[in-house]
Amino acid sequence: MEPTAEVDLRERPSGEHRARLFEVLAAADAGDEVAVVAERDVDPHLVRYVIERGRALDWTYADPDAEPRELRVTVGDPLDDARGTVDVRDLKPRRRHRVLLETFDELGAGEGFVLVNDHDPKPLYHELESMHGDVVEWEYASRGGGEWRVEVVKTEASDADDEGVVTRYDVREIPKAERHPTIHHRYGMIPAGGTMELVASHEPRPLRREFRQQYGDSFTWEVVESEPGRCRVRITKDASVDASSTADESADADGVSAAPADDESIDVIEELDVRDLPPAQRHERIFDAYDALDPGTGVVVVNDHDPKPLYHQFDAEAGPAFRWEYRARDPGEFRVLIGRAETAADGATDEGPSTPF
């Protein structure tokens, strides 16, 4: 079937892509098919069109992994509830989260989309909650059978929308003994130049001293709000920090070091290479391996992309004994030590019952 219209975005500035797509789609009738060629993913633009124009769209890629992107967009009828559907089952894992995070970032308060995936996308929920706070409404419409459908709604605007904060953490709700290791884990996950925001009952000066001892001058510390019972602190990692090279310096020739960053002894009992597994089976296999670990042991997971979304799920569910350390970050080969510590690190400086750190 020949498309009704064609739009090639490769020669246009990226800032014009959305307007051009909207123009072509608005001129199409229900049932028309529009051929789109672009250098990058246009899924967030299409979801935005559904939300703003209240009209159904369905799109498929000729080859989900090919560059440039070539897809066919079929225009549907007006919708009663403007929820665009984002089916990421044909996309490689590394593209799935990028598309979905960008789509969520652009949502306004009360807006949402329907996510379709071939396995439980729960790690995305934890990642969104980490970045945006308690503004993520997540409701399963169907589970299993290779088709998981979730309605994702941003209940209200998040502070992360326009302030460049990568992750936000209210530490007042974390047991005192778990705060320091949890915060260091989160800080280790943000990219160079990224900002982590903490919310505490007052400024956590003991943590600041600990950061200075461990990270030197490679971060900035800014108190952006201070009032009785609430203090917001932004910690920004210096843009020149190279987390992968830092990890490599502590690794041996095989990319596996003898101990994780917090100097605990974790015995590596297995290397688990999940690159040949279908995406729908990878997380389950890794969680099974973690569940089988004895205290003080770990497994090195090898993946073809950064498994950062998995970190957010472990961080939310596995408890303070969970350990995570990158051993290598190379194109097509990411190696991460996932371990279970002997005991939960206390990590806290006791300065009285009212001190949050």
Image (spheres, rainbow, N blue to C red):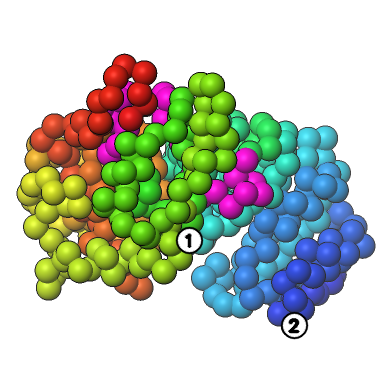
Q: Quadrant of residue 153?
A: top right
Three-letter residue code for mark 2:
Glu
Q: Any magenta on residue 169? A: yes
Residue at image mark 1: 193
Q: Picture coordinates of residue 228 (x, y %)?
A: 54, 21
Name the residue located 28 percent from the left edge and 69 percent from the top edge: 245
Residue at image mark 2: 11
Q: Picture coordinates of residue 137 (x, y %)?
A: 59, 31
Q: Quadrant of residue 208?
A: top left
Please determine whether, in this image, residue 327 is positioned above or below residue 162. Answer: below
Give left or right: position of 31 versus 129. right
Name the residue located 12 percent from the left edge and 53 percent from the top edge: 259
Give left or right: position of 243 versus 164. left
Q: Nearer the viewer, residue 220 or 323?
A: 220
Q: Secondary structure at mark 2?
A: loop
Please determine whether, in this image, residue 336 is positioned above or below residue 332. Answer: above
Q: Picture coordinates of residue 5 (x, y %)?
A: 84, 72
State which quarter of the image contains the C terminus: top left
The region drawn magenta spans 159-181
Residue 347, can we see it? Answer: yes
Q: Secondary structure at mark 1?
A: loop
Label whose residue precedes the other's in the sequence (2 or 1): 2
Name the residue located 58 percent from the left edge and 52 percent from the top edge: 164
Q: Picture coordinates of residue 353 (x, y %)?
A: 31, 16
Name the residue located 55 percent from the left edge and 48 percent from the top edge: 165
